[in-house]
Image (cartoon, grey):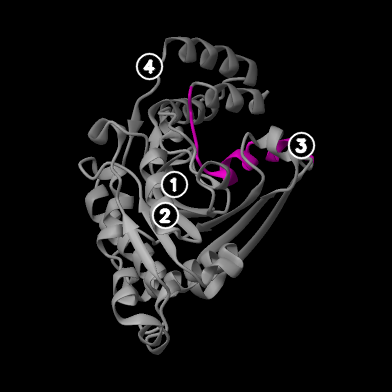
């Protein structure tokens, strides 16, 4: 019954973009999810946890509601803290997993897309990452292959395409035009995400080779950015910065009722009544989000710079 309460709570539009959180919703079933592989690793000296969710086939895709591919989640409890001694080794981990998912495409021209609305702080992660990138495409075109090899760099260009409300265009339409003109081998998209758990806000990085659907976590369904749509490999990097308000209310009430000794049946009935009257589609972000987004965007941009320019 306890599991039913949790599933009922989650159904009130408690959205998440994290494959890890979707997989965790099956945890209490004590069964393996067909077509889904879960691998966990804790890096003690860096105080981070790495979780891989690998969706192998259509069975896994149907169960998870996410495309076939690899989802790597880096849980870093001190990510939002102003501590360079923590961010530097974390950057090395991000570099490692970006290169792993890129495979052979790590050598060749790459386009970075910083998704989101620069004017809305929780959604400004992508544009702020782009602000800190060391773009090199123009330098290589100007000074040639010898300059590229001497400085151990790959061709990197970047764009912050904004959102439909600012441009009147789908992000996919903008990126298709840029890709057609510049012909990169790979697109790396950075975006803010929504989480199911408050503890994962500003402390978690998801890297996946399946692309991304901008705004899906908060119910704004835009055209997907993936290889099928854009014609190039798409790596997505995201950090959850908002949580569904309904989730906070449900989780708080559940803990309160449980602590007061209510039976599982009583809790279930009460939560059902609350869920029917709850105002959904409200998203919450932590205080200090300005500083957190600034620091996290810098860490991700440093990782990207190191991926494509060895002299940095």
Q: CA distance from mark 1 to mark 3?
A: 30 Å
Distance of label 3 from label 2 (alpha carbons): 30 Å
Q: Which residue is mark 2?
A: 203
Q: CA distance from mark 4 to mark 2?
A: 27 Å
Q: In the image shown, does 133 or 155 lie closer to the viewer?
A: 155
Mark 1: which secondary structure? helix
Say whether marks 1 and 3 touch (CB < 8 Å): no
Sequence-first tag of 1 and 4? 1
Q: Label 1, on which residue?
A: 199
Question: Looking at the figure, which quarter contains the C terminus?
Answer: bottom left
Q: Is residue 290 above or below residue 107?
A: above
The earlier-in-sequence mark between 4 and 2 is 2
Closer to the N terminus: mark 3 or mark 2?
A: 3
Name of the residue lying farthest toward the left = 119
Q: Which residue is mark 4?
A: 279
Query: Magenta residues?
Result: 13-31
Residue 94: image x %, image y %?
Answer: 48, 66
Mark drawn on residue 59:
3
Could you tell me which quadrant the N terminus lies in?
top right
Above or below — where is 278 with respect to 102? above
The one of 237 and 146 positioned closer to us in this rendering: 146
| Lower sequence index among marks 4 and 3 | 3
Q: Which residue occupies 30% across, 66% down?
A: 133
Residue 22: % across, % down: 60, 39
Residue 61 placement, left or right of 140: right
**Secondary structure of the residue carrying numbered label 2:** loop
In space, the residues marked 1 and 4 are separated at their CA atoms by 22 Å
| Cβ–Cβ under 8 Å for marks 4 and 2 | no
**Contact, mark 1 vs mark 4 (Cβ under 8 Å):** no
- In the image, taking residue 115 as reference, residue 18 lies left or right, namely right
Residue drawn at 34 percent across, 69 percent down: 137
Q: Are marks 3 and 2 in contact (CB under 8 Å)?
A: no
């Amino acid at each position: 019954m306890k599991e039913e309460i949790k599933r009922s709570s989650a159904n009130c539009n408690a959205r998440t973009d994290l494959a890890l959180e979707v997989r965790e919703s099956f945890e209490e079933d004590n069964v393996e999810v067909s077509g889904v592989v879960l691998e966990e690793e804790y890096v003690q000296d860096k105080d981070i946890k790495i979780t891989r969710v690998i969706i192998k086939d259509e069975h896994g895709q149907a169960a998870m509601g996410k495309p076939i591919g690899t989802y790597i989640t880096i849980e870093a409890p001190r990510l939002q803290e102003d501590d360079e001694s923590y961010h530097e080794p974390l950057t090395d981990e991000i570099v490692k997993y970006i290169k792993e998912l890129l495979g052979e495409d790590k050598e060749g021209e790459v386009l970075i897309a910083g998704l989101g609305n620069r004017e809305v702080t929780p959604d400004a992660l992508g544009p702020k990452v782009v602000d800190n990138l060391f773009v090199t495409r123009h330098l290589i075109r100007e000074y040639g292959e010898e300059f590229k090899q001497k400085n151990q760099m790959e061709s990197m260009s970047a764009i912050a395409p904004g959102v439909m409300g600012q441009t009147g265009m789908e992000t996919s339409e903008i990126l298709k035009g840029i890709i057609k003109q510049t012909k990169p081998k790979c697109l790396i998209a950075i975006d803010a995400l929504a989480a199911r758990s408050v503890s994962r806000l500003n402390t978690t990085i998801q890297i996946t080779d399946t692309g991304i659907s901008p705004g899906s976590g908060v119910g704004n369904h835009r055209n997907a950015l993936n290889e099928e749509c854009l014609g190039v490999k798409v790596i997505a990097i995201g950090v959850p910065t908002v949580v569904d308000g309904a989730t906070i209310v449900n989780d708080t009430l559940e803990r309160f009722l449980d602590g007061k000794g209510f039976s599982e049946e009583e809790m279930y009935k009460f939560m059902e009544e609350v869920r029917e009257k709850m105002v959904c589609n409200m998203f919450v972000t932590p205080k200090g989000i300005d500083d957190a987004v600034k620091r996290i965007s810098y860490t991700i941009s440093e990782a990207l710079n190191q991926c494509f320019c060895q002299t940095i």
